[in-house]
Amino acid sequence: MPTLDWIGKQAVLNHHRQVPYRLLHCNRELSAGDADAGNLLVQGDNLEALKALLPYYAGKVKCIYIDPPYNTGNEKWVYNDAVNSPEMRDWLGKVVGAEAEDLSRHDKWLCMMYPRVALLRDFLTEDGAIFVSIDDNEVQNLRALMDGLFGARNFIATVIWQKIFSPKNTARHLSASHDYIVVYARNATVWTPKLIPRQEAQDARYRNSDDDPRGPWTSGDLSARNFYGAGTYAITCPGGRVISGPPKGMYWRVSQQTFKELDADGRVWWGKGRNNVPRLKRFLSEVKQGITPDTIWLHTEVGNTQEAKKELLAACDFTDSPSVFITPKPTRLIRRILEIATDRDSVILDSFAGSGTTGQAVLALNQADGGSRRFILVEIDESIGTNVTARRLTNVVQGKGESVPAMGGGYRFCKLGKPLFDEVGNIAGEVRFSDLGAHVFFTETGSPIPKRADGRTPLLGVHQGKAVYLLFNGVLGDRRPGGGNVLTHDVAHELPAHPGANGRSKGGERVVYGEACRLGPKSLHHYGITFRQIPFELKVD
């Protein structure tokens, strides 16, 4: 299979594994509404934020939507990833320019995107999907990159979104009226899109001109180009007209016997004079309660850029939108994605949050259908994160006058803290039991911790029959710096029993993390314990 190559590729293939785990610190003053609603806004570099979030949300996100830089040359984005590569050091801190002035602009974009998409893939549930907005500048590179990370077999579609509704007369060649949304599934064999809710305009086509007791209906052609049933038979209309067969080169959709049964059931429409070519009646009460999604999304259905700017101005109470948001996305566009790709209790992730449209769309859909969806947003720019994203979310949660009704819910505003490990590989002094516990459980099992560790017990949780324990900061009661962090006979006796040990007090596979171990191999075997020393046996990638 063809593969994509670019400057710096080898340096970034494993960069997402080398990014340090950082702590998350919530700011109550910048949070709003119900803090326990499960929604997060994280301010910080999205690569580091994703790594910090991974122990909590790996394999739990049903839908990812991202709107990365399109690399148009006008966005003034900067490549700043600390990759250990001589050829890329010259890129750091410099604005990525336009095509003619920056010959490595596509390489920089791919180097920025690869580790982020690699991490995003690990967040998805087995039946989850990722939607990526893009335009013609990078769509071909995005497809190749996604094929490499997700597998070409998991490509779903490239959606065309009509972002503007009138041509630009100032266009040099053709006026670009659309963007793309590239869709990949974590596993295309199990991902199934939801139906789009029916609109009033679609139902308006159904009428009841013959007062059928089954209600409104519309009619469909009885003929088709493909062969169905008996093919071509004569039909006699109730008014006496004889129709020798379907139009030339076509066939009746149903067999003659089935046609007679449909007519007897009042499911054939002959026209008011009962002499027209017959048509099959389709009742509104019998159609699917939704529409199968297609790949062309018109602005009349999902909004446009102009609508998005008005929403942003209203939600943030701005008189003029920040110049950084050249083409914001309308909430109707994101809502369409959520309708297709989420359940009512799904987790949605947007690591290029920008103005916060995804958060507002999640809250709006929850309000409309009573759902409990949760969003995780990441915004790198501190000014945008606090003055735009958080401002917008706070206003839509609490309401802002008549133009922005309160949607309820709430969110926590978080910032990235220091790395979990210091420069020499030891656990940083400010690390709490809950932070380390989440990391320990994730790196041991590959799954997020089932319940946030509160430090009351060393038992972090059980995964596939394996119980994971952490001895850290005197969790067993000794509050001295080293107290209770060493596995001894006394500590082993005090460990909670394995919850899945089938009634045995100490049975079942148990993995214990601690600073040191005073037990020999026979004693460890007796207790059914595998000991791992921290930080040396604690994975950091």
Image (cartoon, rainbow, N blue to C red):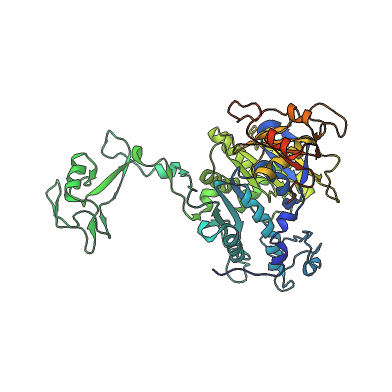
Q: Residue furthest front?
A: 522
322, 538: nearer the viewer = 538
Q: Residue furthest right?
A: 480
Q: Quadrant of the N terminus?
A: bottom right
122, 375: nearer the viewer = 122
Q: Residue at x 33, y 41 (%)?
A: 207
Number of numbered callouts drawn: 0
Q: Is residue 18 above or below residue 391?
A: below
Task: Locate residue 407 relative to residue 379 in the image: left or right.
Answer: left
* Residue 399 visible here: no
- Residue 85 place in picture, x, y as percent: 78, 66
Task: Locate residue 304 relative to residue 94 in the image: left or right.
Answer: left
- Residue 24 place in picture, x, y as percent: 77, 41
- Residue 505 place in picture, x, y as percent: 65, 26
240, 66: nearer the viewer = 66
* Residue 292 visible here: yes
Q: Quadrant of residue 215?
A: top left
Q: Is residue 53 above or below residue 506?
A: below
208, 153: nearer the viewer = 153
Task: Locate residue 450 relative to residue 214 in the image: left or right.
Answer: right
Q: Residue at x 17, y 45 (%)?
A: 260
- Residue 25 place in picture, x, y as percent: 79, 39
Q: Residue at x 66, y 41 (%)?
A: 448
Q: Quadrant of residue 161?
A: bottom right
